[in-house]
């Protein structure tokens, strides 16, 4: 049972490049979400999904796109990377919004 | 939206000491989670505790929902307890989870 798997673990991009961060879970969880964590801060919600085909914005959605075509996968896309998007990104899943969230190990993204 | 405040922001303990971390929230909630972020950056679920008290080894947590706070107790601290402790609650309406800024704990050997 792998839980929540994020790939890649590390990535360096140049300003303006595009990239997709992958997130997959094998627990048949309906609720999935993406967070970013900046130094000295807690996690801030970027986007979330309550099931396949349904997504919505969190606190800091600008510059990011998501889609949810399957229950298992919830990729996060940066269309034109900016230095302000340098951060650690976490994906999480749970059976529903009231149940405990399970986190992946994170992706450390640097944008030069 | 709901506000989450954690205290203290930083804490240094000698190995073996006990500590209490606090999480205050500004609105009623129907769930609350405590996480430990270890020095490698991994987020570990500690407790899911919308109300009442739970214990897991040296750690325990109490949430008093009517008074809008939760406490995390660490007894006989160990160096491996070092890291950042977060509490998280759903916002009003429940689809978004709001994290506190965390308590950074360092346990000295």
Image: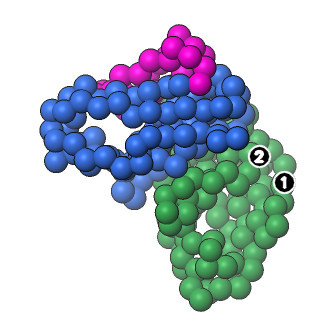
Chain colours: A blue, B green
In the rendered view, would you say B71 is above or below B13?
above
Query: Could you tell me if the residues under marks 1 and 2 are in contact, i.e. CB atoms within 8 Å?
Result: yes
From the top left corner, tell me how far across and down residue B84 is, in percent. Answer: 54, 62
From the top left corner, tell me how far across and down residue A71 is, in percent. Answer: 60, 20
The residues tagged by marks 1 and 2 sit, at their Cα atoms, a distance apart of 7 Å
What numbered label is drawn on residue B49? 2
Residue situated furthest top in the rendering: A53
Q: Which residue is mark 1?
A: B53
Q: Choose between A99 and B103: the one closer to the eye.
A: A99
The residue at the point 25 percent across, 47 percent down is A12
The residue at the point 54 percent across, 55 percent down is B42
Instruction: Report if residue A44 lies within the magenta region.
Output: yes
The residue at the point 36 percent across, 50 percent down is A10
Q: Which quarter of the rendered picture does the N terminus of chain A lie within?
A: top right
Q: Is residue A91 visible?
A: yes
> Could you tell me which chain the residue with mark 2 belongs to?
B
Q: Secondary structure at mark 2?
A: loop
Find residue A30 and report its image quarter. top right
In the rendered view, would you say A105 is above or below B81?
above
From the top left corner, tell me how far across and down residue B52 is, in percent. Answer: 84, 49
Q: Pointer 2: residues within 10 angstroms few (<14), some, or many (20+)?
A: many
Q: Which residues are magenta?
A: A43-72
Seen in the image, is B18 located left or right of residue A51? right
Seen in the image, is B19 located left or right of residue A60? right
From the top left corner, tell me how far across and down residue A40 is, in percent. Answer: 39, 58
Instruction: Report if residue B42 lies within the magenta region.
Output: no
Label count reads 2
Residue situated furthest front in the rendering: A1
């Amino acid at each position: 049972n792998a839980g929540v798997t994020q790939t890649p673990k590390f990535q360096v991009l140049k300003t303006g490049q595009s990239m997709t961060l992958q997130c997959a879970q094998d627990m048949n969880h309906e609720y999935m979400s993406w967070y970013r964590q900046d130094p000295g801060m807690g996690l801030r919600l970027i986007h979330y999904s309550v099931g396949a085909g349904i997504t919505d914005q969190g606190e800091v959605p600008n510059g990011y796109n998501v889609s949810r075509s399957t229950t298992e996968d919830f990729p996060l896309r940066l269309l034109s990377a900016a230095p302000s998007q340098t951060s650690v990104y976490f994906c999480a899943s749970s059976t529903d919004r009231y149940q405990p969230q399970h986190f992946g190990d994170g992706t450390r993204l640097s944008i030069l | 939206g709901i506000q989450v405040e954690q205290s203290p922001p930083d804490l240094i303990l000698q190995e073996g000491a006990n500590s209490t971390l606090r999480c205050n929230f500004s609105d009623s909630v129907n769930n609350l989670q405590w996480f430990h972020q270890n020095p490698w950056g991994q987020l570990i679920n500690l407790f899911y505790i919308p109300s009442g008290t739970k214990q897991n080894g040296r750690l325990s947590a109490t949430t008093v929902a009517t008074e809008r706070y939760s406490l995390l107790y660490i007894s006989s601290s160990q160096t491996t307890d070092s890291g950042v402790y977060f509490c998280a609650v759903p916002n009003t309406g429940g689809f978004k989870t709001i994290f506190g800024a965390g308590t950074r704990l360092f346990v000295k050997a």
